[in-house]
Image: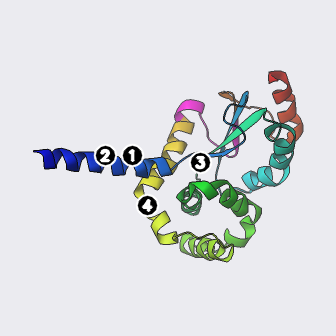
């Protein structure tokens, strides 16, 4: 009987440890006054534009000053984006770095006439960038896949997300045109 309890304890301990490895990709301090959630798809060109144009200004003016924290949430629009999202979640300590690299170089890997071709480009890109990731293990990890898809499900249920990128500021959907000027106006009202 003790062996059964021990096995159950070990099973749940392993499960808890595995779950602990999957975590939110965050930029900013945990206790920031303003929390921005960004629902995005890694194959979305508008999401890449957000990361190239808006995010650097936002980081400089609000994140680095401790006023804002951003949580990047997954809202994959296709299978290639789903696999890329799984890659970003595979190593939580490198998640933000991988996310930024994928958006900054989106045209290098989001190309091809089939999902298989895009996935192969993604695999080659991750290797070329020097991220020490077991690609096959990551994209086939059911727990990571569930985590990514649960972000999408939660986004639809809680915030009625239907496009990317979608910004949520302190649990309110940002409804204006997404540019730094409009975002700054909204943030200044909350400071």
Which residue position is annotated with label 3?
Answer: 75
Q: Is residue 155 above or below residue 78?
A: above
How many residues crowd mark 1 within 10 Å: few (<14), some (14–19), many (20+)?
few
Q: What's the residue at 86%, 40% (across, down)?
A: 180
- Residues at marks 1 and 4, CA–CA distance in whole angstroms: 16 Å
- Residues at marks 2 and 3, CA–CA distance in whole angstroms: 29 Å
Which mark is nearer the camera, 4 or 2? Answer: 2
Q: What's the residue at 58%, 45% (across, down)?
A: 24
Quadrant in the rendering for residue 111: bottom right
Which sits in the foreground, 164 or 99? 99
Which residue position is annotated with label 4?
Answer: 141
Residue 24: say if magenta.
Answer: no
Q: Is residue 23 visible?
A: yes
The answer to the question of whether label 2 and label 3 lie on touching residues, with beta carbons closer than 8 A, is no
How many residues crowd mark 2 within 10 Å: few (<14), some (14–19), many (20+)?
few
The answer to the question of whether label 1 and label 4 lie on touching residues, with beta carbons closer than 8 A, is no
Is residue 168 left or right of 1 when viewed as pictured?
A: right
Q: Which residues are magenta?
A: 157-168
Q: Is residue 67 above or below residue 2?
A: above
Q: Is residue 27 above or below residue 189?
A: below
Q: What's the residue at 52%, 70% (across, down)?
A: 135
What x and y, as percent, mark residue 119?
A: 57, 71
- Pointer 4 or 2: first along the chain: 2
Which residue position is annotated with label 2?
Answer: 12
How many residues crowd mark 4 within 10 Å: few (<14), some (14–19), many (20+)?
some
Q: Is residue 43 visible?
A: no
- Pointer 1 or 4: first along the chain: 1
What x and y, as percent, mark residue 163?
A: 66, 44
What x and y, as percent, mark residue 23?
A: 54, 47
């Amino acid at each position: 009987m003790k062996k059964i309890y021990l096995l159950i304890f070990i099973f749940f301990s392993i499960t808890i440890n595995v779950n602990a490895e999957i975590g939110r990709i965050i930029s900013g301090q945990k206790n920031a006054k303003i929390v921005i959630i960004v629902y995005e798809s890694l194959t979305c060109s508008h999401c890449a534009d957000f990361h190239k144009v808006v995010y650097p200004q936002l980081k400089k003016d609000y994140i680095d000053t401790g006023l804002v924290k951003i949580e990047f949430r997954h809202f994959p629009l296709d299978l290639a984006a789903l696999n890329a999202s799984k890659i970003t979640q595979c190593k939580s300590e490198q998640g933000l770095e991988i996310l930024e690299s994928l958006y900054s170089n989106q045209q290098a890997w989001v190309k091809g006439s089939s999902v298989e071709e895009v996935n192969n480009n993604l695999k080659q890109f991750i290797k070329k960038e020097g991220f020490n990731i077991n690609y096959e293990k990551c994209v086939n990890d059911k727990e990571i896949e569930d985590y990514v898809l649960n972000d999408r499900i939660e986004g639809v249920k809680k915030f009625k997300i239907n496009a990317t990128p979608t910004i949520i500021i302190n649990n309110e959907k940002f409804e204006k045109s997404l540019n730094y000027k409009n975002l700054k106006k909204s943030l200044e009202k909350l400071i």
